[in-house]
Image (tube, coloured by chain):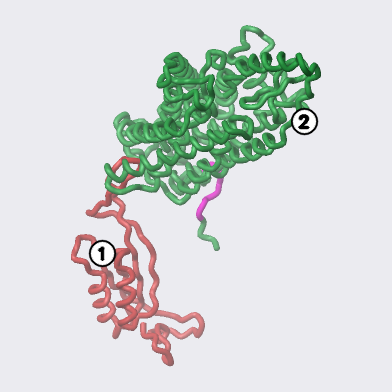
């Protein structure tokens, strides 16, 4: 099992969501993040123009079985891409174990339903 | 506001003496229900300007860690100044002083605790309507208490405006003591000078329909003095710190706009044509100023901003305040456009150049807007609205001179008074929040609460 954490543009979130869904990844968590980096955004408050160093992005976090890793990465890399500086980053982590709270199942089976199509 | 009580009194005296020849008995003066109903509503409108209007406007502009502190500052001023107002404030501002030499400068204590004021007494102050009182004096058509409460709301909002200057870095105890003393020592005397029948600026003929001098210049000058003396916020780098919730700013500006109809159209103390004119010019000046600011944003900084149009609207409302009973629609349009042009330059270019940290532009919008309004009243006052008053544009250069005297003395008095008061309160109580408190945020350190929790 792997965890994929991707920092993506907010503007590409809907595209990424659709690409993941098409790849069979149907659940994940996400949250808005603020970071610092090379790119700056210009801000205007009451006529004063200044560069704000803060960068707004969205973090997507997904846990998948090893067999699904490759297509998940491809889906994100293709859908979050614009070619401009600031497209984001993607990190892969090992996951030691997973438990489903309802059934107390553990291991990879905790990530998908045998009788349904959910495939994480 | 009550500038022409005197001339009306003489007029009425003439009128009634011719009348007296035919009907010797003068009808007992009585409360006009229409005027009273409108003034009660107007009083509520002015309260609406403070809470939640100004609280939201300022609260949205600060960072999320300080929003409750700003709300609390406005709220506690509503409570505290209202109590101060009935104890001594009203008497000091609008009462008569038994010591002859002090009469033009400050009222006495005869009306302390609203002593000797009955529920059916008529207001001794009036603008539009008046009637002959029992002993030959002239009285208004609304209960005295309604006038007192209407003025109470003005006394409340004035120190609340200063909050914009020192927001995000003042300790709460120091703030409260400073604000209450400021109200007693600075606001009440200036209100007495300009609005009470004994006031020296009133007698000089200064025009201030709804509080450009007393409220906005007074608070605006105190704002810049406190902003400089308190020092910059630790992380202020000569540019505005972005607002944490612009939707609050818009709601606040909207409520201020609505409330201002009470502020200005109520200042005629009657429901009549003059109130209607005040309502109309208030609305038009605010609209012109909002539009001008949005266009400036659009042209200079490429996009019209929401904070910009809200600020412009407030600037227009400030500037039309002293002029609302004296100018017509042309004057309102000119005042609206001019105030946005100048205030925009002040906050966009002059403030960063000078480097003082007026957090929410209390001086840049209220001080500067108030000065522009008071001066332009002396230029644009037209006899078409009130026959007795005209400005420089209608050949009465004297009025402009009087306006400049009123503006100048208010600036000096408020500036020097605020400076001394600040020094004293800072020495005995301390005004600046500690660096640690400022960094953590005043919501948590001053009140133990946070505005946006993670609880369901």
How far from the left and from the top, in percent, is residue B344?
35, 36
Query: The disc numbered 1 marks a residue on which chain?
Result: A
Residue for badge 1: A88
How far from the left and from the top, in percent, is residue A24?
33, 83
How far from the left and from the top, in percent, is residue B211?
53, 28
Seen at 45% across and 39% down, the residue is B284
A8 or B52: which is nearer to us?
Answer: B52
The lab-note entry on whether marks 1 and 2 share a chain reads no
A105 or B57: which is nearer to us?
Answer: B57
Seen at 60% across and 39% down, the residue is B47
How far from the left and from the top, in percent, is residue A117?
39, 88
B409 or B456: which is nearer to us?
Answer: B409
Seen at 32% across and 39% down, the residue is B239
Q: Residue furthest bottom?
A: A115
B36 or B339: which is nearer to us?
Answer: B36
**In the image, A55: left or right of B141?**
left
Query: The disc numbered 2 marks a residue on which chain?
Result: B
Q: Residue furthest top?
A: B101
Q: CA distance from mark 1 to mark 2?
A: 71 Å
Q: Point out the frontmost of discs 1 and 2.
A: 2
**In the image, A26: left or right of B413?**
left
**In the image, B45: left or right of B245?**
right
Query: Is the residue A109 above or below the residue B284 in the image?
Result: below
The disc placed on residue B94 is none
Q: Main secondary structure of the magenta part?
A: loop
Residue for badge 2: B119
The image quadrant that residue A15 belongs to is: bottom left
Magenta region: B445-452
Q: Residue furthest left?
A: A83
Check the rendered structure and report the hue given to chain B: green
């Amino acid at each position: 099992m792997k965890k994929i954490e991707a920092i993506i543009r907010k503007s590409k979130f809907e595209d990424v969501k659709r690409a993941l869904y098409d790849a069979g990844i149907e659940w994940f968590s996400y949250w808005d993040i603020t970071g610092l980096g090379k790119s700056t955004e210009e801000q205007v408050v009451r006529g004063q123009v200044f560069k704000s160093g803060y960068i707004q992005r969205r973090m997507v976090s997904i846990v998948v079985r090893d067999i699904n890793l490759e297509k998940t990465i491809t889906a994100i890399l293709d859908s979050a891409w614009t070619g401009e500086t600031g497209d984001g980053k993607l990190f892969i982590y090992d996951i030691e174990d997973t438990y489903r709270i309802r059934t107390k199942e553990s291991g990879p089976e905790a990530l998908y339903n045998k009788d349904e199509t959910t495939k994480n | 506001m009550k500038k022409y009580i005197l001339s009306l009194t003489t007029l009425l005296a003439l009128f009634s003496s011719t009348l007296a020849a035919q009907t010797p008995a003068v009808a007992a003066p009585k409360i006009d229900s229409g005027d009273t109903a409108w003034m009660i509503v107007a009083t509520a409108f002015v309260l609406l300007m403070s809470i939640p209007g100004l609280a939201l406007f300022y609260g949205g502009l600060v960072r999320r860690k300080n929003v409750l502190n700003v709300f609390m500052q406005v709220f506690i001023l509503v409570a505290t100044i209202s109590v101060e107002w009935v104890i001594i404030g009203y008497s000091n501002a609008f009462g008569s002083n038994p010591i002859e030499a002090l009469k033009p400068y400050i009222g006495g204590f005869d009306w302390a605790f609203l002593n000797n004021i009955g529920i059916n007494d008529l207001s001794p102050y009036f603008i539009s309507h008046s009637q002959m009182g029992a002993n030959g004096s002239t009285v208004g058509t609304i209960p005295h208490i309604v006038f007192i409460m209407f003025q109470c709301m003005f006394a409340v909002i004035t120190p609340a405006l200063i909050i914009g200057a020192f927001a995000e870095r003042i300790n709460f105890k120091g703030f409260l003591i400073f604000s209450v003393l400021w109200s007693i020592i600075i606001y009440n005397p200036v209100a007495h000078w300009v609005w009470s029948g004994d006031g020296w600026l009133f007698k000089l003929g200064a025009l201030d329909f709804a509080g450009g001098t007393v409220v906005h210049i007074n608070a605006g000058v105190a704002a810049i003095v406190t902003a400089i003396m308190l020092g910059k916020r630790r992380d202020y780098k000569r540019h505005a710190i972005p607002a944490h919730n612009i939707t609050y700013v818009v709601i606040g500006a909207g409520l201020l706009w609505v409330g201002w109809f009470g502020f200005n159209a109520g200042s005629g103390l009657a429901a009549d044509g003059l109130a209607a004119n005040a309502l109309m010019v208030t609305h038009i000046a605010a609209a012109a100023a909002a539009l001008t600011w949005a266009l400036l944003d659009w042209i200079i900084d490429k996009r019209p901003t929401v904070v910009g149009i809200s600020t412009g609207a407030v600037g227009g409302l400030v500037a039309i305040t002293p002029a609302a009973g004296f100018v017509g629609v042309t004057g309102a349009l000119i005042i609206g456009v001019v105030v946005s042009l100048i205030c925009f330059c002040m906050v966009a270019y002059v403030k960063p150049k000078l480097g003082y940290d007026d957090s929410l532009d209390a001086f840049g919008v209220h001080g500067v807007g108030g000065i522009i309004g008071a001066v332009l009243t002396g230029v644009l006052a037209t006899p078409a609205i009130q026959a007795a008053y005209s400005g420089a544009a209608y050949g009465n250069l004297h009025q402009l001179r009087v306006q400049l005297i009123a503006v100048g003395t208010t600036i000096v008095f408020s500036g020097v008074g605020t400076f001394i008061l600040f020094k004293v309160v800072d020495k005995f109580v301390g005004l600046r929040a500690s660096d640690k408190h400022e960094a953590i945020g005043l919501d948590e350190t001053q009140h133990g609460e946070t505005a946006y929790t993670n609880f369901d």
